[in-house]
Image (spheres, rainbow, N blue to C red):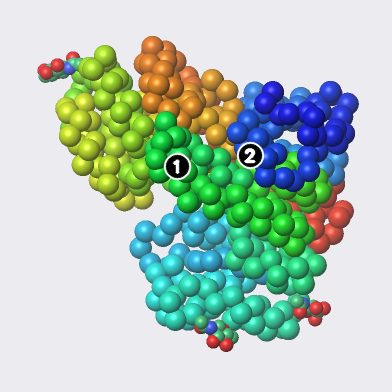
Amino acid sequence: MGWKKPYCKPRYASSNSHKLYYCRTSLTILTLALLFGSAVYVFTPETRFWEPGFLHHEARYRGDLRDLNSPWNKLCFGPTSEKLKIAVFSKSWPTGPSPGGMERHASTLYSALASRGHKIHVFTAPSDRQQRSEVKEGNLSVHFAANDHGSVNFSLAYEMFLQENGSGDFDYVHTESVSLPYWRAKMLPKVAVTWHGIWYEIMHSKLFQELLANPNGLFPGPTTELQEAMPRLLDEIRFFSSYSQHICISNSAGEVLRNIYQLPQRNVHVILNGVDEKNFVFDPEAGLRFRKKHGVPSNVSLVMGVAGRLVRDKGHPLLYEAFSSIAKQHPGVFLLVAGSGPWSKRYSELGPNVRVLGALEPYELSDFYNALDLFINPTLRPQGLDLTLIEAMHCGKPVLTTNFPSITGTVVLSGEYGYTFSPNVGSLVEALNLAIRDGLKSLQEKGMFCRKHVLSMFTASKMALAYERFFLCMKNSKYCQYPLPTDC
Ligand SMILES: *[C@@H]1O[C@H](CO)[C@@H](O)[C@H](O)[C@H]1NC(C)=O
Ligand SMILES: *[C@@H]1O[C@H](CO)[C@@H](O)[C@H](O)[C@H]1NC(C)=O
Ligand SMILES: *[C@@H]1O[C@H](CO)[C@@H](O)[C@H](O)[C@H]1NC(C)=O
Ligand SMILES: *[C@@H]1O[C@H](CO)[C@@H](O)[C@H](O)[C@H]1NC(C)=O
């Protein structure tokens, strides 16, 4: 382990002999923690038993949900008759065409909760930045509180919240990241925040980006971005405790919040983001049609694909270089590139083994994933809502991706789901070679394994049920018991 013991004192030793060390917050220690980040992520036995092989009649979680360190999504929650009134603060709400991941997530989640009979009031701004009036659909009300530039006016949003609270008080308040600023959250006793990315993870990725951009450490030295990251991280650790309850979207972020940010165990929960399983299905025929339509030669031996914005921090310089070398050794390997951005032109110059498709419409995405034998996500940013891995897995595809703790601790748990690599060209080439050597049959088996895994964890309905139970538990602790007689 790279974790230096002399700086740390044992916090507790659990019965199963995992020792965690509590360290005083100092720049040195945080740097060490970051450098040896993976050593900090201690796997609890629970992490393992959430694998797809786990069946209900095996060890089933029993106890208080607030003590659970693994995703709530995995549990099977039954119906409840109690209905809640929930306030939501979100930076934006999808209104125009092609909304971003964050907006789609918010709309999926709150529409699902509203359709389950809860009164949901969202205080937000429209994603297209146009002037809009309130939206009311059944039990979902969306209140727009935008300033002149179209972003949220926090004061106005809060005023609207107080006004709505006046006509029937809220059971609980939920904020997507800092959409409800911490100085306001501090005043409210019943607030939960969902973190979609934390500075500890951002720091981790900035470190990799710096090493890639400047491998020899010569002039001009670390970017200001990297230098600015540490103060941001410290600031974040200081203000996070203003929020009472924390929801993370990966196991590793939960561990960081407990172990590095030092938040109370019982106030940190993991609820994974889900994608709408109806939109991403396993459909080999649609995949074949997609290949034909886009001119993928029928004699290729393996089709790989990548999707998203074709920019530097999504790892395209790495994939570009790695694939150029792979294509020379394996002329039958083909690469489909979906998305647009500065790297699009370079990919299209790579030769006959690469096809650049441009940005795809949302309805084409499932077919695109189905056309692949392997989905690649070379991202250098572990934080945020990069749901493409989950979408590809819903379509029954194995994945090849960066070995960030947020990915290896929650999504690609082992080699049975695909391949992971360290963010450098050599490691990526090695992983690609391994996948090619394993061959189509093995990739298909891994793909089915992936599909089973994401269906058990990463669906929109599992996410909504987990949040529903979370808010019920926060309102009335009787709902924190698991399982209840009504649970499945
Ligand atoms: C709104 O919630 C109530 C229960 O609180 C439910 O009876 C009703 O069907 C819901 N309306 C819609 C449109 O979902
Ligand atoms: C934000 O809302 C407050 C309260 O309604 C208002 O006084 C203020 O001028 C608004 N600020 C901007 C930038 O729109
Ligand atoms: C919301 O309303 C309830 C009941 O009227 C009140 O007790 C509570 O303080 C209000 N919340 C805020 C933040 O003002
Ligand atoms: C596939 O067929 C084309 C045209 O017949 C040929 O030029 C190409 O070399 C073949 N590729 C492979 C990998 O066999």
Q: What residue is rendered at 80% in x and 30% in y?
A: 6
Spatial separation of the CA atoms under disc 2 and disc 1: 17 Å
Residue 126 drawn above or below residue 225: below
The picture places residue 39, in percent across and down from the top left corner, at 67, 28
For label 1, the crowd category at 10 Å Cα-Cα, with few meaning under 14, some 14 to 19 and many 20 or more, is: few
Residue indicated by mark 2: 31
* 335 on left or right of 183: left
Ligand 2 appears in which quadrant?
A: bottom right
Q: What residue is rendered at 78% in x and 43% in y?
A: 24
Nearest-to-viewer mark from 2 and 1:
1
The picture places residue 480, in percent across and down from the top left corner, at 83, 50
Q: What amino acid is at disc 1?
A: Gly
Q: Earlier in the sequence, mark 2 or mark 1?
A: 2
Q: From where the camera sits, is residue 337 visible?
A: yes
Q: What amino acid is at disc 2?
A: Thr
2 or 288: nearer the eye? 2
Q: From where the camera sits, is residue 54 visible?
A: no
Q: Which mark is residue 459?
A: none
Residue 33 drawn above or below residue 172: above
Quadrant in which residue 218 is drawn: top left
For label 2, the crowd category at 10 Å Cα-Cα, with few meaning under 14, some 14 to 19 and many 20 or more, is: some
Q: What residue is rendered at 57% in x and 23% in y?
A: 414
Quadrant in which residue 353 is drawn: top left
Secondary structure of the residue carrying tag 1 is: loop
Quarter of the figure with the C terminus: top right
Residue indicated by mark 1: 221
The picture places residue 333, in percent across and down from the top left corner, at 27, 21
Secondary structure of the residue carrying tag 2 is: helix
